[in-house]
Amino acid sequence: MSFNVSISRRALMSAAIAGALLLPVKTAFADPGAWSDEPVRIVVTFPPGGTSDLVARLLAKYLETEFGQKAVVDNRPGAAGTVAADYIAKQDADGTALMIANNAPFTIAPTQFETLPYEPMTDFTHVAYIGASAPGLFVKPDAGVATVAEFVELAKTQSVSYGSSGVGSISHILGKAVDAELGIETLHVPYQGSAPAIQDFRAGVLDTFYDMVAQNSEMIEDGEAVAIGIAAAERYPGMPDVPTFTEQGFDIVIENWVGLTGPSGIDPVVAQQIHETALAVFALPEVKEQIEALGITHRALSSAEYTEFVETQMSVWKPLIIAAGVQGK
Amino acid sequence: MDIFSNFGNGLLTVLQPENLLYCFIGVFLGTFIGVLPGVGSMAAIAMILPLTFYLEPTTALVMIAGVYYGAEYGGSIASILMNIPGTPSSSITCIDGYPMARQGRAGVALFTTAVASFGGGMIGMVVMAVMSPVLAKLALSFGPTEYFAVILLGLVAASAVSNGGALKGIAMVVAGLMLGTVGIDLTTGDLRFTLGVPELRDGVNLVIVAMGLFGVGELIASIRANKDGRGQQKIDYAQFYPTRAEWKASIGPIWRGGGIGSFFGALPGTGQTVASAVAYAIEKKVSRNAANFGKGAVEGVVVPEAANNSATQTAFIPTLTLGVPGSASMALVIGALMIHGITPGPRILTEHADLFWGLVASFLVGNVMLLVLNIPLIGIWVRLLQIPYKYMYPTIIVLICMGVYSLNNNVFDIWLTLAFGIFGYLMRLYRFEPAPLLIGFVLGPMMEEHMRRAMLLSRGDPMVFLERPISGTLIGITCFLLVYGLFKSFRQHRHGRVRPLPTTE
Amino acid sequence: MKPERLADESPDIASAHYRWWAASGGLFLALVSLYFMYGGLALGLGSPFRPGTGAFPFFTGMILLAFSLTIIFRDLRGDGLAEDPDWISFFAIGAALSVFALAAGRLGLVPAAFLTTVIASLPDRSLPLPGKAILGSVVAAGCWVLFIKLLGLPFDAFEWRW
C-alpha cells in the first residue's frame, strides 16, 4: 500500500538527518511523552464551547497532567476555519503549533472559496486522526415517516424544508447530497449553527433538519423527532435502532471528523512522538468516556493513514459542494 | 408549594461550602473581567472551562453563571468611569453613566448600578423560577416571523436612544444596519463588502465596533479635554450615596428594566444588548425626567443595568430548557454540561432538577455576593478617577488593544478597531452618536436573517408577517409608534425650526 | 457634545467655509451609502418575495442616503456644529494602535504594550520622556501579570518574528 512506502521513506530521511546532526537517534516509534519543553499551542477553528474546543481542552488538560507536556488552547475562529489553518501553516514546524483540523478548512473551504491563503495538503503535517461524529436526518414524528423510502414518497408529494447549520456547512451539503441521491428536491433553510435550527424544528417551522445524531438523542427518546437515517458507514453506538442510509440502499456516508494537524515539515520523529502521545491521551478511560459523550467515535489511524484520509476526503467533498452550489465564493 | 420547596433544596445545594466558594470565585472573576474593556465573560468562562471538568456539574454551572452575571455588572463600571463599555451590553450605560461621573456623581452612579443590577437579577431569578416552562414555550412560539416583528419593534424603539438631533440618531441606526451586512450572507453564502479580507467573512465583531466607537473615539476626544494635570473629575463625597429622590426615581426603572430584560433574555439570540437598548428607549418615552436623559439621569443608568442583568439570568432559560444558546457564552455553558454527559433540553427540569434549582438559587446568593463585594469597592473605583489622565489614557489604550486582541488572537482585529476609532472620532466631531449605530448593528443582521428566512419558509408569501398573531400584533404596535413618532417630530419641526443646541446642566 | 470641551473654541459659525466643514460628515455618510447601494446592486436585489443578497444593503443604503442628504442640507443652513478636531491626539492614538498591531505578533506582548503606552502618551507634554518610559514599563509589566500570568491567555510575552 502506498502509505506504507511513504512511512519508511520518511523514517529513513529522519534517521539520516538525525545522524548527520550527530544527535542521539530516537526510535521512530517512541513511547508516549512530552515532545517539547515549550507549551504547545492547540489552535481551535471555533470559538470556545463547541465540540472541537472541548476536544482540544481535554487534550491539553491530559497532555499536561498525564504526560507532562504543557499545552494551551488557542481559539482562532473565523472564515470557516481558514483563519486558523492559515495561522498554523505559517508557524514553526517544531511541534509547538498544532490545530484541531476538521472538514471546514481542509475539505470544504478549498472548493467553497475562490482563494485560500494556504494549500490544504502541502502546507500541513497531518499528525493524528482523533475521530468522527455521524450526522443524520431528523423528521417530525407526526409526518408518519420512518424510513428513507417513505421520506422520498413524502418529499415527492409536498414541499419539504430542511434546516442546516449554515451555507456550506456539513448539514447543508449533506442535505443536497441526500436530495441528489434520492432524486428529490427539498427547501434548504440555513441557520447560524444547529441550535436555532432545532429550535425552529421544535416550534414546527421546519419539517426536517440534519445534525450530528449524538446531540439529539434526547429528542428522539422523548418522541419529539424521528431519526430516519444516519450518514455513516456504521450505526451510532448510542442509537443502535437507527439505521444508516447505506443499509436502506442509499449510498450516503459523510464523516464529521476531527484530527490533530500541524504545519508542514514537522520532523517525522517529533510527529510520531506527538502521534503516540495524542493517541495515548485519547485511550485514557476518562477521556474516552468524555469524547464519546460528545458523540465522537475514535478510530486509531496511523499518521500516514490520516494524511491519506484527508486527501480522500477532499475528493469526496468537492463534487458535493459543487452540487450544493456554494463553490467559488 | 412546589416552587418554594424546589428553591429551598436549591438553596441548600448552593450553601454547601464548595459551591459557595466557586460561586464567589465566579462573581469575583466576572466582575474583574467585566471591568476590562473588551474582555467579556466569554474569555473568562473559556479560561475556567477546563477546571469545570473536575467539578460537579452544579458547581461548574454555578461558577460559570457567576462569571457571566459578574461580568455584566463589571462592564458597567468601565462604562461609568471611562465611557468605555466593559461589555457591549453596557454601552447603553455609558449614555448617562459617564455624564454622571463627569458631574462628580460617579459614586452615585456606581451605587445605583449595583442596586439596579441586584434588583434586575432578582427579577430575572423570580421569572426563571416561576416561568421557565412558560417562557420556554414562548420561545418556541417565536419563529422567524415573530423574531422579525420583535426586532423591528426594538429598532424603532432604539431610534429614540439618541440624544442629539433625532435625524442624526436615526441615520446612525441605519448606518449600523448597513454595517451589519458586511460578511458572508447567511442565506446564500455570498460575500458582501468583505474587500477580499478573510477575517471580514464573518462580519465585524460587536466588541470591535463598541471598542472602536466608544473606546478609541472617546479617548481621542478626551485627551485635550483633560489636559490639565489632575484627575478629570471632582468628587463630591457628600453626594456619594443616592439621595432619597434618586432612590425613589430608581424604583420604577428597576421594575421596568427588569421586566423588559427578562423578556429579551428568554428569547435566544436577542440578549442583553438589545434588552438594555430597548429598556432605555422605552424608559425615555415614559419617564417624567426624559429631558435629562443623556445628561446624567439616574434612571438612564438604572434601567439598562436592571435590564441587562435580568436578561443575563433569563438567558439560562432557553439555554437549559431548549438547548438553544442565545450567545457565545451560553454556548460555553452547554459545552460545559455536555462534557458531564448532560444534554440541555426540556428534560433538564425533571431529570436534573437539583442542577436547575441550584442554579436558580445561586442567582440569589451570587447577586448578594456581588452587592457585598462591590459596594465597598465603589470608593476605590471612584478614586481611580483621581489618577491624572496622562497616566490613565495610555493605560486604557493598551487595555483596549489587549481586550480586542484576546477575541480571536488576531492582529487584524486591532486594525479594525483603529478604523472604527477613527470613524467614531470623526463622527463625534459632527455630533453623530455611537450608541444608535451599535444598536442598529446588533439588530440589523438579525432582522435581515429572520426576514429572509420567514420569506423562504413561506415560499415567498409576505402575508405571514401579518397572519401569525404574535407577529401581526407586534407589527401593528410598531406601525403605530412609527406614525406617532413621525407626527410628533413633524409638529416639533414646524414649531421650532432652529432648535437650541442641547446643553448640559 | 459636552460644552466644557467646546469652551476654548469659538468657530465662526457664519462662515461658508465652516458650514461646508460642518456638512462634510453628512457628505461622508452619503458617499458610504452610495457605495453600499452600488454593492447591493452588484450582488443582486432578487425579487420582492425572494429578496437577494444585495437587497438589504441596497435599501438601507438608500434610506441612509436620504437621511444624509437631509443632514447635509441642515448642516449647510448652520444647524450642524462640528468641534475642532484635535489632530495631534488623533494621530498619536492612531499610531499607538498601529504599533500594537505591528508589534504584538512580532515582538510579543510586553514590548507591544510598552511601545503603545509610550506612543499614546506623546501628545501629553506634561509628562517628560523618562516618565513616559516608566509608565510604559509599568503598563507592560501589568499586562504581563494580568493577561499572561493571571488570565492565562495564549499570548507570547516576548517573541522575535519578522
Image: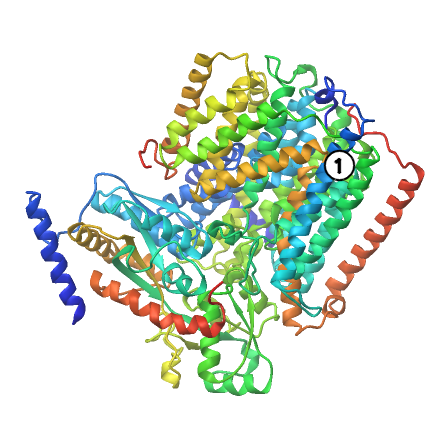
Task: Give the quarter of the image for residue B452.
Answer: bottom right
Query: Is B339 rendered above or below residue C140?
Result: below
Say left or right for A267 vs A323: left
Quadrant in which residue C105 is drawn: top left
Q: Which of A82 and A32 is in front in this view?
A: A82
Q: Secondary structure under badge 1?
A: helix
The type of residue carrying mark 1 is Ala
Q: In this view, does B69 lie above or below B113?
A: below
Image position, residue C42 (x, y; %): 62, 61
**Residue picked out by circle 1:** C23
C152, C92: nearer the viewer: C92
Callout 1 environment at 10 Å: few (<14), some (14 to 19), or many (20+)?
Answer: many
Q: Is residue C88 above or below residue A197?
A: above
Horizontally, is B79 left or right of C22 in the view? left
Q: Residue B310's image quarter?
A: top right
Chain ID for label 1? C
Q: Residue at x 58, y 46 (%)?
A: B313
**How does the figure colour the protein chain or chains?**
rainbow
Q: Image quadrant for the C terminus of chain B?
A: top right
Q: Foreground: B331 or A76?
A: A76
Q: Can residue B139 be seen in this view?
A: no
Q: Residue at x 51, y 24 (%)?
A: C120
